[in-house]
Image (cartoon, rainbow, N blue to C red):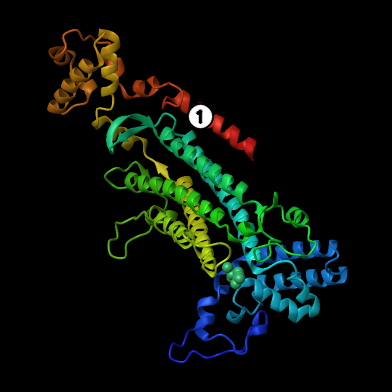
Amino acid sequence: MTKANKNAPKKTTSSSIWGGRFAGGPSQLMTDINASISYDKAMYKQDIAGSIAHATMLASQNIISEADLTAICDGLAKIEQEITNGDFAFSDALEDIHMNIESRLGDLIGDPARRLHTARSRNDQVATDIRLWLRDAIDQLDGQLAALQDALMTQAQNHITTVMPGYTHLQTAQPVSFAFHLMAYVEMFGRDRTRLSDARKRMNEMPLGAAALAGTPHPIDRHQTARLLGFDRPMANAMDAVSARDFAVEFMAAAAICATHLSRLAEEIVIWSTDRFGFISLSDAFTTGSSIMPQKRNPDAAELVRAKPGRIIGDLLALLTVLKGLPLAYGKDMQEDKEPVFDAEASLSLSLAAMTGMIADLTAHPDAMRAALEKGHPTATDLADYLVRALNMPFRDAHHVTGKLVALADQEGCALDELSLADMQAVEPRLNTSIFEVLSIDSALQARNSFGGTAPEQVAAHIKATRASLAKDG
Ligand code: ARG
């Protein structure tokens, strides 16, 4: 963007697109605050696709001639090439992608270019472009989420019997498998995918042809344009069509939730890869060294994924704040919708790619996981359940007796299954050797065989069912 000179805001000539009633041009500051081309040029493909569909419809309604249509389509194809090749000169004075393209079309094909804007306005044009852009972005994010789920399931498949501490309050609670823990995230990312696809369904309605806000006297066929652009239908109310941005808010809300899920996994990766935990190692590809401490291997990618919700949630709040209290129909305030949307999308996409790489590359350390588990008396709940079953003890009493045995093991500095039967009988005389069967970590894992539980049989079935349903949905 051109740098503003605050002391001498200079006048330029009036806009060739809308300057009919203006004698002079806007000040440089007006141009600076008004221009969105620096970022909305990202939508050039969508803008061109929208224009081609609109022109096609205008021609089939005999609003423009076939010759004009051909000229418009050829010109737009050339412009798309120019932009893709980096040969297009964007201008701040032409404000945005819509006017930059239209003006260039005028240079290329002359008069027919001036007929393209019949029965539309930039208000319905921009709303259409963002919907088209987001639709593509969601499809791509969905593919990235599927790849992340796949990476998680590939790791999970190898660790169905790898035991680790399941935590509550980040204190050892019960044994779980590493696969079970990873599969929790597969579920979360599956819900993220459905949230995005729900948002996509609602956004797949077309604003184009709403014109400025009230529709148009030209005999247009919005159903045809909608079909050409792959929209389910034209939007039913022109004023809503140009004013609505809830689809963008919804996208960012879904993105914020997904980023929050990624952030939780990122934090676990940071914790698991510390030398205290040592549950996993990240690959060289996803760690960095320190410029001063040669021994360091820092999980920077995970830390950045952990941090990204800061800006994605910020993006969501930015647009909600712009929209709150904004009267219908279009206000220039709404131009502030694009940067948050683009930023949220780019941040989420990068986070997903980095997380998928980290997961695919990481090495799990089952011995370290088991050692951590053994320290935490993770089978205490199994012991209490055993007392209920074997001695018909009320659960509250069983909890109390188990607590005493845990205290005894702590006192002797050993695991529960390392206490002698005599020691245990001093706490509860009715105990016998069958107690040792429930104290083992592996049998505790096997025992949690309820649907959705951590037992290997359940987790293997969960992976299989998830893979089958993802293959079916494509
Ligand atoms: N660049 C504008 C935006 O993003 C396009 C719509 C302009 N409409 C208008 N009435 N000035 O919102």
- Find residue 320 and report its horizontal and vertical position in percent: 46, 58
Secondary structure of residue under mark 1: helix
> Hey, what amino acid is under mark 1?
His
Asked if residue 1 shows in the view, the reply is no
Q: Is residue 83 above or below residue 16?
A: above
Q: Residue at x 33, y 36 (%)?
A: 369
Instruction: Quadrant for residue 118, please give it.
Output: bottom right
Q: Which of 375 and 21 is in front in this view?
A: 21
Q: In this view, does 203 lie above or below 330?
A: above
Q: Residue at x 35, y 60 (%)?
A: 289
In this figure, which residue is indicated by the disc labeled 1? Answer: 462
Asked if residue 402 shows in the view, the reply is yes
Q: Residue at x 41, y 43 (%)?
A: 363
Q: Nearer the viewer, residue 460 or 330?
A: 330
Q: Nearer the viewer, residue 1 or 404?
A: 1
Q: Is residue 299 above or below residue 157?
A: below
Instruction: Quadrant for residue 98, please give it.
Output: bottom right
- Find residue 53 and report its horizontal and vertical position in percent: 76, 61
- Find residue 227 and report its horizontal and vertical position in percent: 75, 53
- Find residue 245 and report its horizontal and vertical position in percent: 55, 57
Instruction: Quadrant for residue 173, please give it.
Output: top left
Q: Position of 369 compared to 220: left or right? A: left
